[in-house]
Amino acid sequence: LAFYQLGMLDGAWFEANGTLLGGLFILLALIVYVGATNVINFMDGINGITGGYSLAVLIPLALINDERLMINDCFIEPSFLIVAILSVVVFCYFNFRPKEKAKCFAGDVGSIGIAFIMLFGIGSLVMRTGDVTWLILLLVYGVDGVLTICHRIMLHENLGEAHRKHAYQLMANELKMSHVTVSLIYMGLQLVVSLGFIYLCPPTVLAHWVYLLVAAVVLIVAYILFKKKYYHLHEEYLASLKK
């Protein structure tokens, strides 16, 4: 349905891009959609993180759309993003709270639902601009999610089983940081990356790719160093369960 709405299934789109290239693009987009949806769902483990991170994605999308609206080139109906942002703000009022004080939770339905909304917004932007580097709007979640999966593969774990190996989980569980603090860190990191990309990065293909690669490398290094320093605490936790 998303691909149909984005115009990716139109005959004219295939004629413009070629059957092979168009089909490959749809296949890659499907992998990104499914993978990102699952990562966003996996990251919904503490109070405030889904709501806060969603705002960190939707607000930059709204800012970009507002700029394009001025030149009659907006990539999505503005009210779509406004309603989504207001809905998440209401959700945050009940969920962005210290541990055990939240009044409601996103659950699988909520996290997958907001994931679809964010991905549709980013997909609309990518289709309008032809620039896939706008996926940087999900970079912080992407680094944590993908590297944690890689880590679990290295440990020969069953990826279908529940775990507590994400960086945010180590912060909240092993380091005893408050849920609100951890959620603000993730929200803040993504806003810094996204706003820097929008307002500081020159609007050229090369600059966008360089910015994306540099930001990704910085976050990857930070993730690895964090895990190297604190993952032993999680191993101690797992050992205690066997006693």
Image (tube, rainbow, N blue to C red):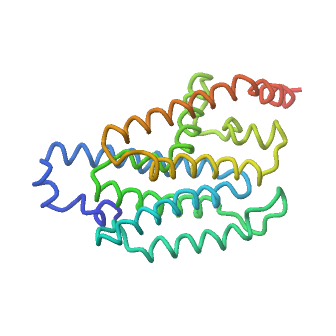
78 left or right of 40? Answer: left
Camera-side residue of 125 and 160: 125
Q: x, y (%) of residue 156?
A: 60, 23
Quadrant in which residue 28 is drawn:
top left
Q: x, y (%) of residue 178?
A: 82, 49
Write the residue at 82% across / 37% down. 175
In the current view of this chain or complex, which residue is farthest to the left? Answer: 15
Camera-side residue of 13 and 162: 13
In the current view of this chain or complex, which residue is farthest to the right? Answer: 243
Quadrant in which residue 122 is drawn:
bottom left
Camera-side residue of 219 and 240: 219
Tag count: 0
107 left or right of 11? Answer: right
Q: Quadrant of the N terminus?
A: bottom left
Q: x, y (%) of residue 58?
A: 51, 62
4 left or right of 217? Answer: left
Write the residue at 42% across / 69% down. 66
In the image, residue 68 sits, relative to residue 26, either above or below, namely below
Write the residue at 12% across / 61% down. 12
Q: x, y (%) of residue 62?
A: 47, 66
Write the residue at 80% across / 41% down. 173
Q: Quadrant of the C terminus?
A: top right
